[in-house]
Image (spheres, rainbow, N blue to C red):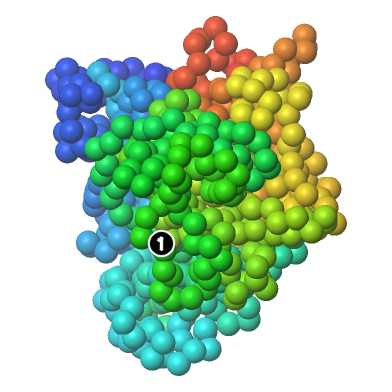
Amino acid sequence: MEKRGFRSVRYVAAERDVEELGAVEPMLSFATSDGGDEEVGDLARQYLDRVLELEGGAGLSFGVDAEPAPELTRSSVQASPLSNSSVVRFAQASGSIPIFGSHMLVEVGADGKLVGVEAELAAVQGTSPTPTLAADEAAARIAALAEVDPAALQGAGAPSLTYYHDDEVDRWHLVWFFHDLAVAPAGGANHEGHAEHARRGHGGSPRHRVVRFNYLVDAHDGEVVFHYSSAPRARGKAHEQAAIPSKCQGLDALGEPQEFFGQAVAEGYELSDPMRRMRTFDIAGGDISASPIRLPKQPIRHAGADFGGDYQAAVSAHVNVGRVLDFYRSILMRDSVDDKGMEIISVVNCISSDDEDPPDWSNATWWDGRMWYGQMHDAGGQVRSFAAFLDVIAHELTHGVIEHTADLIYKGESGALNESLCDIFAMIIGNWYRVGADSDPAHWSWEFGPGLGGSGKPIRDLSDPGRTGDPDHMSRYLKTREDEGGVHTNSNIHNKAAYFLITGVDGAGKAVISPREAAILYYMCLLRLPQRATFARTLRGLVDVARSYFAAAERERKVAAIEAAYGRVGISLVE
């Protein structure tokens, strides 16, 4: 599983003699529950330094120009209440220049003891750290690739120097790293995601049409060595409301009665839930292709607490977003999308004239830090809001969760993993509310977006990817330049592994891993994944989490079930 150009270091404290960490042992009285991010980060760094010494120190110098000790910078600290630990991420640099794809993770328990270390360390060699190509010349190479006037890149942020390793040819590059450029490579790359959704009967959206790409340009010869889609980041602080929620009711987009929390205001009640930090707006057919997008000044309001059938799409959006947030909070102990109480804004009755002829816009999407919902006419001519689809909303909000955790690069296998994890949580959350909490997966629907794909099929079927023309085994992994390397296609291989994991039974026909356990395993694994994670790396993460999460009496049985599920689709611990 070791990437070319990197050396992997893995240290699981439970499998080792703690006396090895003698240099750090006096610090074991530290408690992460009482310490802030700085204290946790400092402790994690000392553990990491000690583990690197134990694992060979100078052994990192596997190249002529390699450094005896890596330069590390802490990038994030993520509390993990499910495991009562903190996960600290570090990134590596060489001569103060960051290394793209470097990954160091240290997990520290609440008692201050080391849980484990996983690192992918680089020894940069064969390229000069001094650029010979100016940043503006590199920008011109991007403009040429995108077939746009170089003036289109004016106003973009200044690029930074980064080291990048091309795994295919085993070569290091010093690159200019351009972030979030509003231009895509020529040849339709900016419409690939749109086209893939359209092929499956799922409309395009600004997230695919309003492009944001990252580019890495060799700082010596000007080759554009790597580019990938950069999903818009969720941003902004939670809307502060010192208010008491009010019990409300109304009909949803399917005509079903729902109860939900709103907020009392002078004019009556509005779709603002101060407890969950979410608000719902009606753009009333506003075009989100327009710039700037003009939102109403206030959330939807009604004279009474019973909204009746006046705002059915909005009621669905409000209820379904609340269900997703409740699941993340109660089952996975995560506080909203960013785990910091971020406010979630939903906007219903959207059109996107650049994607589809109004009044239809067949989509619901997480874009620009908000949820946007369109609508379509069904076979009977009735208008149906996409706010009605809980699984689609769970999928889209999980994209936001991924942005704030592993931030998986949206290209190739890591991009397919990004899509798959969103599908997995969509299935678990959708069935959690549709069939029942902790229900038997034998009674679940495994269709993602039922009826929304081509010819009345679902967008994807996790139980039978072949039904929508998608691969279900690594032997059929699609190598393509379209759709960011087939992220919506190859995701189904990992989807099928998750299906086997959740539905797996032992010889007595008893479930081995419950849906609740599966959700916890995938979430805790996500917190520990590197940006360029593969399916095999995810399997390793699931096994590591299972070994620490489950009691000794059932541990090996659970691990065997995970490995067996992934083995059935050709994914193993040895890449």
Residue 194 locus on image (x, y percent): 64, 67
Q: Is residue 171 left or right of residue 559?
A: left
Which one is in front, 541 or 427?
427
Tell me the residue at 26%/44% (across/down): 240
Which one is in front, 433 or 6?
433
Q: Is residue 261 above or below residue 298?
A: above
Can the viewer see residue 112?
no
Q: Secondary structure at mark 1?
A: loop
Residue 418 locus on image (x, y percent): 55, 49
* Quadrant into which the N terminus falls: top right
Can the viewer see residue 355?
yes
Q: Is residue 90 above or below residue 95?
A: above
Q: Which residue is mark 1?
A: 296
Residue 414 locus on image (x, y percent): 55, 52
Task: Classify residue 131 by image quadrant.
Answer: bottom left
Tally of numbered tags: 1
| Amino acid marked by disc 1 | Pro
Tell me the residue at 61%/28% (across/down): 432
Q: Circle 1: is it few (<14), some (14-19), or many (20+) Cα within 10 Å?
A: few
Residue 526 locus on image (x, y percent): 47, 39
Tell me the residue at 64%/64% (across/down): 361
